[in-house]
Amino acid sequence: MHPSHSPRPLTAAILLATAAAACSDTREPTAPLPDLRASAQSAPAPSPLATTTSGSAALELWPYTSDDFTNPKDPVNLLFVGNADPRSIRAALLSVSEDHSGFPLPFVCRWEDIPEGGIQSTYAAGTGWTGSAIQLACGDYAGLRFHLRLFAAGDWTIGAAHVEFLIPGTTEHQVLSWEVAEQFVTFDLYRSGVGGLIGSAVINDQPAFRTIQGQIVGLLASDPTLAPLLAIACPTGVQLPWACDGSTDVGILTDGSATILGLEGEVAAETGSFHRTSTVQFDQAIPKPFCVDAAFPFVHVNGPIELREHWVLTPSNNYIARFQARGRLLLTPVNPETGAMGESYTAMVYEQHRAMLTDRQNQVAQVVMQVEVPPASPFHGMLAIRFGVGPNGMASYDASLTCGG
């Protein structure tokens, strides 16, 4: 969800592909979430760690990001050294124009802050767990965009970038490539005048990390208007170990290396604050996220969600970002295969992100609450997730799911 963009569906068929995948899910419908609680004392260093160097500067890091301190989410594909504070990188990227002539893909966009991006963390020896206080995007939320998370780690900044598109009918983005986004960020830091390529280091999985569902790939391949998206996921001239025709899932390509960029000089950051409030009216069917009834694997969601975004950069170079989403929705159980519908009921949703980066502190936190009313009814439930990273590697995660009936 994003308050500044209206949906621009690529094709309604993609949602049907997502539905087909969800209908084949055989997981226990009321299985509880795993207890992955962590604290500053009990969240150990992940493994394995990778080491990279630039001159006399060395960085030992976990080459992935996570939203629970356990499971890898995205691969780290950018490392910044030199004048590499995330706020400096942000200022450099925000300074470049929307014209990306010279980049292999025709793209017109400006970088902007996106407090709505999900909070993630990564780990570096010496600094411990660190959170994505600054997140940037270039492109339309409802179309194709580049998404960059920045993690402060002492003299280094760790970056994780991908190019993604919004799956119509949902609020989920599908990652298409790690590699193209890595190249795009590098290209724009060159354009800003402060970034210079130092080298690269192989630190994580190759030739792919995570996958794109075959149904989605097949629809991209069958719709000529979506050919540019397919070309990102399955570039021509690259020998792939899978077919890009929808017959199988497709790996999200990565060569396992992170580009190392040395940053010199600085672009002056524009201080100030930004507020945005809007309402999104939902009227769509989505896979039921938890407490699933096998007879009704989908719910039709109807109702408004109020979105609030805020970020500020103070004259003291303190960066603060906040995001909040809340709403009361009407849910109607749906079986997309038979067309059957169940009795409608109410749900309340709430999500909040908070981030702060100063010369002394780097803190992020995320709270997600989803309550189906009444939560004790069969196949109703309540989901609560709390995730946070604070100073000195402090890390906390708590997830609880209660299903009724």
Image (cartoon, grey):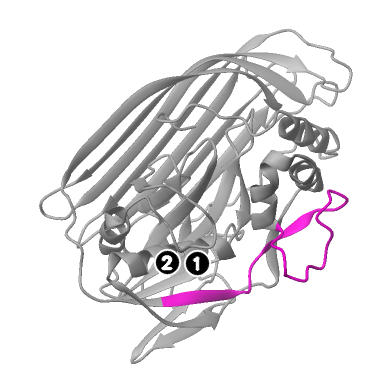
User: Would you place residue 210 above or below residue 370 in this image?
Assistant: below
Residue 174 position within the rendered picture, expressed as x and y whole percent measured from the top left: 63, 46
Q: Is residue 253 left or right of residue 193?
A: right
Residue at coordinates 45% horizontally, 64% vertically from top-left? 102
Residue 365 position within the rendered picture, expressed as x and y whole percent measured from the top left: 39, 46
Judged by its main secondary structure, the magenta piece is: loop
Q: Is residue 91 left or right of residue 248?
A: left
Q: Is residue 275 magenta?
A: no
Q: CA distance from mark 2 to mark 1?
A: 6 Å
User: Would you place residue 188 above or below residue 31 in this image?
Assistant: below
Residue at coordinates 38% horizontally, 53% vertically from top-left? 99
Quarter of the image for the C terminus: give it: top right
Residue at coordinates 52% horizontally, 67% vertically from top-left? 76
Identify the secondary structure beneath mark 1: helix
Q: Which residue is mark 2?
A: 187
In which image quadrant can residue 275 be found? top left
Could you say which is closer to the camera, residue 299 or residue 145? 145
Q: Is residue 304 left or right of residue 202?
A: left
Q: Which residues are magenta?
A: 234-260
What amino acid is labelled 1 in the image? Gln
What amino acid is labelled 2 in the image? Phe
Residue at coordinates 75% horizontally, 36% vertically from top-left? 18
Q: Which residue is mark 1?
A: 183
Could you say which is closer to the camera, residue 318 or residue 387? 318
Q: Is residue 43 visible?
A: no
Residue 390 position within the rendered picture, expressed as x and y whole percent measured from the top left: 34, 56
In which image quadrant can residue 215 be found? top right
Identify the secondary structure beneath mark 2: helix
Q: Which mark is residue 46?
A: none
Crowding around mark 2 (Cα neighbors within 10 Å: few <14, some 14 to 19, many 20+) is some
